[in-house]
Amino acid sequence: MHWMTESLQLLMPSPWREILSGLMAVLAGLAIGNERTRKEKPAGMRTMALVCLGSATFTMVGFAFESKTGDSGRVAAQIVTGIGFLGGGVILRGPSSIFGATTAAMIWLTAAIGMVMGAGFPIAGFGLTAVTLALLKFVGRWEHTHQGGVRAETVYVVFDPQHGKSLIKLEKLMVDYEITYPPNNLTLLSDGRNRLQIDYRLAMHRHVEFLNSLACMPEVSEIERQG
């Protein structure tokens, strides 16, 4: 069972260990990216796979520099710095809260897993991938249902359709808060405005953020609550 704990650097000749490490990094990135894609987040499967593969590649290049420059750690250190700019690009500030922080953290962690893969420890990399996915699923579910209590409510939003543009903004907001609505919840009023019924269950802090985001939309003229 030594193959589970020792680095591929010691177990396989080049270039097969680099090819295998790269393939394993792609698989780990795809697994993490699939979770983001299913939740319609900005960094999906291709992005996470490329981040993981890129980090693994730079790490493997660092080993090649070790015998020539004497400092393979410089490459790995620059991965941590460089990935911060990519992660920062997915963080958006809304009218009442910040979106994308979890995805940014996932990009950062995916790069770390890629470094583990590039160092020749695929079993450890897949173990970290499993821990990451479990954290997103179970802790996220617990946070959604237990942190500060859960608020179930129905709100009716009256808004100016603006040739369909307002509905697109509302749909994007509901995607951010993982809220779905059936098409028959939208009705046309006699004065030309639209009325949308939104049923949701959110943790208390996200409940307040969601209502505040609705209130900050200039297209929205009325919000009627039925909790």
Image: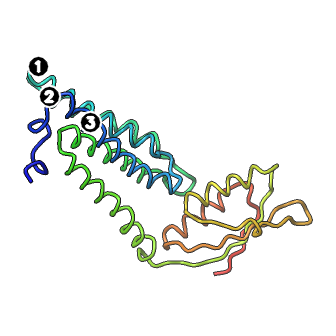
The numbered dot on residue 69 is: 1
Please tell me whether residue 173 is drawn above or below residue 80 in the rendered image.
below
Left or right? Give the position of 32 relative to 197: left
The crowd level at tag 1 (other Cα within 10 Å; few <14, some 14-19, many 20+) is few
Pick out the residue farthest to the bottom. 227
Tag 2 residue: 72
Tag 3 residue: 56
Quarter of the image for residue 153 reads: bottom right
| Label pair 1/2, CB-CB below 8 angstroms | yes
Please tell me whether residue 176 is drawn above or below residue 47 in the rendered image.
below
Q: Secondary structure at mark 3?
A: helix
Camera-nearest residue between 44 and 168:
44
Q: What residue is drawn where x is 55% and y is 62%?
A: 177
Quarter of the image for residue 173 reads: bottom right
Q: Amino acid at mark 1?
A: Thr
The crowd level at tag 2 (other Cα within 10 Å; few <14, some 14-19, many 20+) is some
Tag count in the figure? 3
